[in-house]
Every structure is written in structure tokens, then in C-alpha cells.
Amino acid sequence: MMAQEFVLKQRTEILAAVCSSGSSEQLERLLDVLLAHGELSWEEYQSIQVQGRPLHANARHLLDIVYTKGLAICQLFVAALQQTIPEGPGARLCVSEGVSQVEKSREAHQTSGAALLSQRPSLVGKLQGCVDGALEVLHETGHFTSEDCNEVRLPIHTPSQQARRLLDLVSSKGELAANVVLQFIDQKQQSGRSSLTPPKEFFKYQKKLCSSVLAQSSFLSTYGGTSHMPLDDIYTEGQLELAADLEVQGNLGLGDIVSTAGIINEEADTVLVSGDAGSGKSTLLQRLHLLWARGTALSEFLLLFPFSCRKLNSELKELSVQDLLFRHCCWPDWEQEDIFRFILDHPHVVIFTFDGLDELKQSFSDEHRLCCPTQPAPVHVLLFNLLQGSLMKGVRKVVTSRSEAVGPILKKYLRKEVFLKGFSPNGIDCFVKKQHHDPAVAAKVLASIQANTFLLGLCHSPVLCWIVSQCHKELLGCGDGTPQTITDVYLMILQRFLQHQSSLKTSKGSGWFQEHLPTVLHLGQLALQGVKASCYVFSNTDLDSCCVTEKDICTGFLIQSKDMSNDYSHQYEFLHLTVQCFFAALYIVLFNNADRSTITKLFALHDLRETGFSSTCFTSCLAADQRQTPGSADGQKSATLGEMSLQRHAEALQVHPTASGSKMAKEVLGKLDVDHLKLTYCNIGPVECTALAYVLQHLRNSVGIQLDNNSVGDVGVEQLLPCLHICNSLYLRNNNITDEGIRKLIAKGLQCDSFQKIALFNNKLTDACTEHFSHLLRTKQNFLSLRLGNNNITSEGAKQLAKGLEFNHSLRFLGLWGNKVGDAGAEAIAGALEGSKTLTWLSLVGNGVGSAGARALAKMIKSDTSLEELWLTENCITRHGVEFLLEALEHNTHVKSVWLRNNNLSVEEVEEMTQRESRLIF
């Protein structure tokens, strides 16, 4: 059905959908889009928005205008309708003819007045929550009268209606007024995270997502998939190069992937990380995820959503963007719609990553356009529209793929391309040493690699370097027969795995291979079938069709796909993409009935379609031997959650808490080398705390334990005490803990030398707990961090803490944000910290601190030699108080920043103070 015909025949349904809520919001959003595209004149807009006329009458008038003006505006109207009311009429109507996306970007040559129109939909969203600020600026610059401001602020208007009314009035005031409001919005956007106003549950969701990403990215599977190791212990930087012909000073780091360096298309959102198979793209992306989750990279992005294209291949249902984010990454427990609306309104603080685009079954295409983020579509259509920017414009997307799999269609939508070139010579040295804790073994392996020029060349590929390291015994024992080709390297790992299972332990020559020939053929047949179909994940049915047995699986070349298996159905994948290609090649060579002509066809790129191969991964793997350059897969796959392994040990030991169970715990936990255990949002209560403490007391080294957002309570705190000696930091945010639980915790903590940090944000603590913390600070001269934010601590509690702070010479971080210490409490804290030589960070955010407190803190700053950051946001400090801080900063160059946003200061005062001292952050 054509769009114009649809507007006519579905008129009743459209009116019902637009007016059903009783609010004019849906109608106004439609008008925003039509105005932005220039399809409505200002006079037509005003003729539709008649105050006092019924909503349905205004909607009818809009439909009359749209239908009368012809096909182009009807297509745009239906596209806008799909975006505004995704479940309404037109949800399934294709309007791709002539409509690529609903919102246009502002062009550089536009006037400010024209920009107000072309950017209207996004400007409405950006102004919500800061209308008052915009009105203040417009009033102070003389563009708005008090009457204008009052008209916008009418209580009958919703926030979005206030934003629209403001834009309407600005449009009538001329070019200068338009320029003022656009500059105001730009400044708000540049101020970053602190200017955002997320929904109430956003930060809980952010923490949940962060916890999920951290768990997924912390570990790498070892070969065979039987165990895992911390990514920190094995990750080695690869060499990154920009595709653009630019000279860059120094080596590129992970942060440069999303930096401004090497940008070839400012309007695009997608960054491609490309490289040969085996250059470490997946592991690099996993590292990026881990650093984001820890808050040490990509800090400009509040949300990161990671996706695996291999996993998306198995999604048969049509999904919307909302489904993709929440079902495939992290489900919000509350306010799903509000959180998704926040993502839509603030795309610049969101990043998506897609690992392994070359593993997607469908080739990239830009033929089917989609612009509505809540409209379901096949996953590959959704993905392609995300990458080209038709969906979620402004969200940064990072995608990995082999270089040869990316065609010119996708490249025209790239913001930048970064090549991952594998290890440098120093990287090889570093990686091998990380693989072998015995320095003597590492030295022998490195000497063997460096003595063989070809082998050294292969080891620039991280996966081949890993194989060589794993097969070090075979490598060191082969004398003059060291590997000379990639095939030799894979035969070496084949021997390593099969001899591990072989009954012919002392056999020489090829006995190990003959014994396992059926296994090689079974796996080879499965691998070849997968390569032909671009299939990398296999069901039990697939295994049965190739006669793959449990014995074959036990060799270690097939591992269970953790992300795609469940209690009822197991899915398997090869240890490595190139391992799959190697087995496919073996099958072609070894199987008597195989057509030998297949081999030559595989090497001819132009014959791929004729052979039925829909993927180039096999060619890439086999051709590598001919050109003698590194080529392998994307690094080892991520293991399941690190916490889960630990959980299995805990459950087993809880069932059998006997002498043998204790022995098992000591053996198992004694081998673990972890420095931080994160178990947030895991529904941990007192019973789980008992099991956790029983297991953790056997750890070899001290560990940080993070149990935020659980149900630990006072009883759970008591159950954790037996393992407190192994704990260097304890995070118990939002756990319903009271002063009584703290009393017992501190009493035990005083006896534990390792115990140095605690975080108790958002519990039920009062001034009564501060006596115990004061005693802790006075007694433990190695204690580093105390965070008690968002509790019920008053000035009396602050005074009690000050008594301990006076005698403490180790504390570096003190957080009391969101309490009620007031000026008196601030004065006590400041007095106790005068002359401190250790404290680097102090937060009294949201504590009712006024100018008297600021004066005391200024005195502290003068005498302090270690403080770097002081947080005083959301208090009651006036210009008088800030003057004290300014004067103190003249005597202290060590302080990096004093945060003073949302205090009792005028716009003029903020501007003046900022010019006088850049370290004051408003």
C-alpha cells in the first residue's frame, strides 16, 4: 500500500492512535518531524496547533494537510508515525522509498533560525530538564521578557511542551535569540555526564549492566575450554594502525579506537577494527569491555552494550532495538521504557560493540532501511541499519571483522577504520612470559622461537603464539624439525591434544594419529559442513549427523558454547575459527571419498560461489600458508562468569563441609590467584554469606570482595567475619546494614591487618556507627578508604569521626556524600584534617554545607599537602564561601579540582569565579 493511500484509508485508525492517550504529545512529535524536514510551513503548523480546539480536531486538520500535499509528505508522515507510535497503524508498512531516517543533521551553512526547525525533534529532547536555564540566559541577554518566561513556564505545560513553546517563541525573536539558545544547548551537551538527568532507576541499571559486562569480560578460556584465566594475567597489547594515511605520534592505544584520530567521516558513528584472523580482535574488544566496566576507559559512555555476531546468528525472531539491548545484554528490573527513552534522547553517551561481523551469515546490505527503534525486524536488518546510522544515530558503534570480509558498501558508512596488526617483537616476548610462570621455561621457548625466523614471523599472530606456547614441550623436543608452516603449527597442536588422550603413550611416529583418525574425520566433516554454511555453532543434531561422539568431544577441540547452551540443549563450537578451518582441510585431504578438486576451488576466490561456500574464512585460513604471513582467529573465547566457578565450589563445599571437603577447598582455592571478587546483584543473603566465607578463608592472597546490591543485612555481615582476614576491601553498598552490624564488623576488622577499605553507601547507618569508625581510624594506621555516603549521619556523627581522623595518618579517601553533616560537621572534619599528608579525595556532596563550612575547608586546604579533589556539589555555599576557597587555592597548587555545582551562586558569579580559578568546577 502506498503511503498516500494509507493516510486516506487508515484515517480513522491513525486518529485513534494519535488521540488515544488524551495527551497532545503524540501529535506534537509528528509535527516536530514534519517541521524539521520542511514539509510544513510555519503558518500550517500554527493552523494545526490551535489552543482550545479539541485534540482530535487538530489531528484531523493535520491529516487533511498531509494528504493534500502529496506522496513525499505522506511517506515522511508514516515514517514519523512508526517512530512515534511503533505499535500503531503503519507499524508494518514499508516506507523506504525516499525516506532513510526521520531526523536530518544540521548543515554547517544553516542559519540558527533554520537549525531550530531542522533540529527540532532532538532540540525538544535536549531542552527537557533545562528549560529554566535556557529561559534565564534568554532573559539575561534581553531576548525574552518576564512575560515570555512566564508563558513558557505555565504549569499546564508538560516539560516537552515547555521546550516546544520556548522554541516557538525563540523563532519569533530572530536570529540572535536562536543563536543564544543553540549555544546554550551546545554548552549543556559539552558539559558531559553531570548535565544529564537520567530516570530514577537509571543508575541501578547502569550498575547491573556494568556488573554483567565485568563478569563476561574478566576471564579468557584456556585451550580445551576446561578452565579460565584472568584477562589481566594474559592480555598483551597488539599493534594498532589507522587506516587513514595519517602520521600519529607514538603508539596507538585502546582509547584511540574511539578518539578523534583518523576520522574519515564526521557524520558516521561506526568504527571498524579489522585485521587478519588471529590478530586478537575479539580479545581486544573484551579488554575494552573490561576497562569500561572498571571505569578506566571509555568514561564518556555511560552505557556499553556488547554483542557477538556469532550468537546473533542463532536469533530467529524479529527484534526491535529495545529487544536487542534488553534481552541480549541486560534486562532493566524497573522503568524499562524510561531507560530506553533516556538512551534514545542521549545517544552520545551510549556505545554498542559487535564482535565478528564476518561471522554473520548474511552479507552487509543497505537496501532495507529502518528508522524506528521499536519496530521489530530480522536481526541482520537491525544490525545493518545500526551500522549505517539509520537506527540510533549518535550512538557509537565499534565492530570487528577480518579485513577481507568488509566490502565497499559498509566502508562508506565508517567513521574510521583501525587495523590490528598482531604482536610486536616486544609483544611476543611479553606474551610468552605471561604464558609461562617459570622464567627458565619461558626463556627456552623464546630462544626456540627466535632461532627460527619463520616461526618468529608466525608468532606475531596472537593465536599462533598461543599455540606455540601451549605446545612448548613438543617445540623444545623437536630439534631440527621445528615447524616451518602454519600447517605444521596446527599439526603440532593436534598432536598435543590427541596424545593427551592417547593410550599409546610411548608410541613413536604417527601411531597417535592413526589411533585417532576416526575422531579427526568426524570433526573434519563437521568443520567442513560448517564452513560451507557459514556455521560456527553446532547442535547435538549436527554432531550426530557427522558421527561425533563423546570421546571426540573430550579431545578438547570442540567446546561447549556457554552463551548459547542451556539445561535442555547444548551447543558446541570449535576451539578456534582457524581450528575449524584446519579440520575442514584435513577432512578434504584425508577422506577417501572427498572430491580433490575442492582444494583448488577453495584457493580461487572467484570460484567460491560455484563451490557453494558462503564465507571467505576458509580461504583466508588456507591461503595463509601460501603467503606465509600470520593468520588465525580472534583470540580465545570468553569464559562463563568468573563468579560462577567459584559458586560451584561454594555449593559443593556447602553440601560436604567435612574434612575432605575442607581439604578440597584448600586445594582448589589455594590455586586461585584473584585480587577482586565481584558478586553484585546476586541475591546474596546470610545463607550465601556463610558458604562464601567458608570458601574464601582458604584463598592464598588477600582479595577485594564486592557484594553491592544484595541482601546481606546484619546477620550476613556476621557470617562474613571468618573470611575478613583475607579481605583487603569490602563493598557492601545497599545491603540493609545497621549500626549493630557495623559494630561487629569493626570489632573483627581491627584484628585483620589486610582490611583497608570499606564502602557502605545507602544502608541504614546513623551517628551511632561513627564511634566505631572513629576507633578504627584511630587504631588502624594502614586504613585507606572510608565511604559512608547516603546514610543518616549528622553533625554529631561527623564530630565523632573527626576524633579518629585527628590521629589517623593513612586515610586517602573519605566519602560522606548525601548525609546531613551541615556546617558544624564540615568544620569538625576540616579541623581534624588540617595538615593531612595522606588524604587525596574528600566528598561532602549534598550535606547542607554553607559558607561557614566552606571557610573551615578553605583553612584545611591551606595547610594540606596531599588533597587533590574536594567535592562540595549540591550544598548551600554562597559567593562569600567561595571567596574563602579561592584565597586558599592561591596557597595550594597541589589541589586539582574543587567541585561546586548546584550551590547558591548566580550565573554571573559562576562565570566570574571560573575565570579567576579554573580549578573551581561549576
Image (spheres, rainbow, N blue to C red):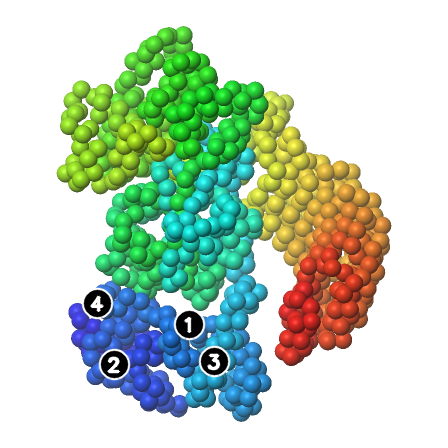
Mark 3, Cα crowd under 10 Å, few <14 / some 14-19 / many 20+, is some
| Mark 2 crowdedness (10 Å alpha carbons): few <14, some 14-19, many ≥20 | many
> Can residue 437 be seen by looking at this rendering?
yes
Q: Which residue is mark 1?
A: 122
Q: In the structure shown, which secondary structural element does the residue marked by tag 2 occupy?
A: helix
Looking at the image, which residue is at 32% across and 62% down?
390
Image vertical order of residue 472 relative to residue 697, above or below: above
846 relative position to 13: left or right: right
| Pointers 3 and 1 in contact (C-beta within 8 Å) | no
- Marks 1 and 4 sit apart, C-alpha to C-alpha, by 24 Å
Measured as percent of width and height from the top left, residue 898 is found at 69, 63
User: Which residue position holds label 4?
Assistant: 97
Whichever of labels 1 and 2 marks the residue nearer the N terminus, that label is 2
Alpha carbons under labels 3 and 4: distance apart: 35 Å
Depth check: give the residue in front, 917 or 663: 917
Q: Is residue 8 above or below residue 411?
A: below
Figure quadrant of residue 610: top left
Between label 3 and label 2, give the one nearer the viewer.
Answer: 3
Which residue is under mark 2?
66
Q: Amino acid at mark 4?
A: Glu
Labels 1 and 2 touching (C-beta < 8 A) = no
C-beta proximity under 8 Å, tags 4 and 2: no
Q: CA distance from mark 1 to mark 2?
A: 22 Å
**Sequence-earlier tag: 3 or 4:** 4
Is residue 257 rendered to the left or right of residue 99? right
